[in-house]
Each structure stands twice: as structure tokens, then as C-alpha cells.
Amino acid sequence: MTTITVYTLDGGAVKGYEAEGHAGGKRIRGYDLVCCAVSALTQTGVNALCAVAGITPDVRVQDGHLRCILPDGLDEQAMANAQIVIRTIMTGLTDIQTIYPNLVRIQQKEWRQADAYDESSALRA
């Protein structure tokens, strides 16, 4: 299963997201399709934050894991642009979860500064 954690700030703004795991293994029909779709959306989110919104997020990637966190100190317009990008990506991921509930799970977690340094969720370079 792929678990997508959406990190939110007080007030509901999204600070970032993390996708972890593979969609059930190759023994499950739809595995390749779901993994490719989740990967494409999460990578597109990173690319759009950079290319469209002009924001450089903190990104960590390794096999079966992508973490994208917005930098601190964004001005109001940059944050608004980032929210449009991230919420668009999350809409697509939610649609995938609806179709493949046994392969994708989206959860929400309040962002704490400690999460930035949480070794259990941080990726090793």
C-alpha cells in the first residue's frame, strides 16, 4: 500500500506531503498503474512548485518514498500559489484512492517543526 501523508498548518494550509510505499506489490492487479500514477502526481507537484510557483521545496526521494515540504517564510502570494499546486495534486491522489482504496491511503497530519527532523519520516540521502 502507498500511504500519502498531507502535512497541514494551523488554519488549514498545506505545508507539504509525503508518499511512502508501493501499491501492494506486483501480485495485485493495477500495481503498476497505481504506482505510476502516484509517482507522476507527486513528482509533478514538486516540478510545478518549482517551475510554475517559483518555490524551491525541500524534496527527498528514494525508491518508494517522496517527501516535499514547503520552505519556511513564504510570502502570502507564494503560499497561495503553492496551495493551488498542492491541492491540485491532492485532488488527483484522492481520486486514485477512491478507485483503489486497497492500494492508496491518504492521511492528514498537523505539521510540527519536529517533523522536519523526525528520522522516522525523513529520508536518508
Image (tube, helix red, strand yellow):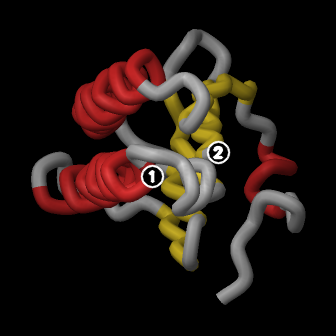
| Left or right of residue 100, residue 88 in this image | left
Q: Which residue is mark 2?
A: 1
Above or below — where is 12 with respect to 78? above
Frontmost residue, 44 versus 40: 40
Q: Position of residue 8 (x, y in %)?
A: 61, 26
Name the residue rendered at 56%, 37% in the picture. Answer: 103
Name the outermost residue toward the left: 52
| Left or right of residue 65, residue 52 in this image | left
Secondary element at image label 2: loop
Give the Cα separation between the discs numbered 1 and 2.
9 Å
Name the residue rendered at 56%, 76% in the picture. Answer: 63
Mark in the foreground, 1 or 2: 1
| Number of on-image labels | 2
Rate crowding at label 1 as few (under 14), some (14 to 19) or many (20 or more) other CA atoms within 10 Å: some
| Occupied quadrant, residue 120 | bottom right
Above or below — where is 13 with respect to 78? above
Q: Position of residue 84 (x, y in %)?
A: 25, 27
Secondary element at image label 1: helix
Q: Position of residue 114 (x, y in %)?
A: 86, 50
Name the residue rendered at 55%, 23% in the picture. Answer: 101
Residue type at mark 1: give it. Tyr
Q: Position of residue 122 (x, y in %)?
A: 75, 66
**Marking on residue 31:** 1
Residue type at mark 2: give it. Met
| Occupied quadrant, residue 11 | top right
Rate crowding at label 2 as few (under 14), some (14 to 19) or many (20 or more) other CA atoms within 10 Å: some
Is residue 48 something one can see in this rendering?
Answer: yes
| Left or right of residue 103, residue 56 in this image | left
Name the residue rendered at 46%, 25% in the picture. Answer: 97
